[in-house]
Amino acid sequence: MKIEPSINVLGGTLSPCSDDPLTGFFRDGHCNTCAEDQGSHTVCALVTEEFLAFSKYVGNDLSTPRPEVGFQGLKPGDQWCLCASRFLQAHDEGCAPMVNLEATHRSALSIVPLEVLKANAPQ
């Protein structure tokens, strides 16, 4: 797997998203991506109770621990590399979490417009 350059949506160096819980397609704490990352785990988000409930409702339970795959489950306040399409879906439904732009990979822009990401970033 060839990792794409670690550039964020603002054109700078990709910042870490989270080491606790350890996130990212490569579980390197960054929202790095590659051609094999079909889900485009590129949006660094601060998850909320509302988003976790939405994600579970649409079939991706991120809050329940799954120790058999080394997943401790997310809780509100955790940062996590979300699939760009799931983030956009949550945005369209009015329950998108906040976004860390410096830690969101530029590949997310192929799915989520920069204006949408900025609208969900801290001001």
Image: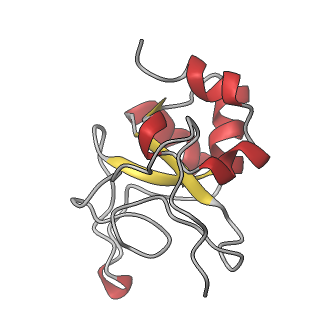
Residue 98 lies in quadrant: top left
Q: Residue 19, percent across and down? A: 24, 61
Residue 77: x and y in percent read 28, 38
User: Residue 123's quadrant in the figure?
Assistant: top left
Q: Nearer the viewer, residue 16 or 83?
A: 16
Specify the farthest residue to the left: 20
Q: Residue 60 in the image: x percent, y percent?
A: 57, 59
Q: Is residue 23 above or below residue 83?
A: below
- Apparent side of residue 46 relative to residue 90 in the rendered image (left or right): left
Question: Residue lying furthest right in this view?
Answer: 110
Residue 93 visible in the shown view: no
Q: Count every numbered label the image shows and give the total.
A: 0
Could you tell me if residue 104 is visible in this image? yes
Residue at x-position 71% and y-position 49%: 85
Quadrant of image for the N terminus? bottom right
Q: Nearer the viewer, residue 77 or 11?
A: 11
List the single residue furthest toward the top. 123
Residue 21: quadrant of the picture = bottom left
Identify which residue is drawn at 50% across, 58% down. 61
Residue at (51%, 64%) from the top-left corner? Answer: 32
Query: In the visual, does 57 lie left or right of 19?
Result: right
Percent x, y of residue 93: 69, 27
In the image, residue 37 sits, relative to residue 49, either above or below, namely below
Residue ID at (50%, 71%): 25
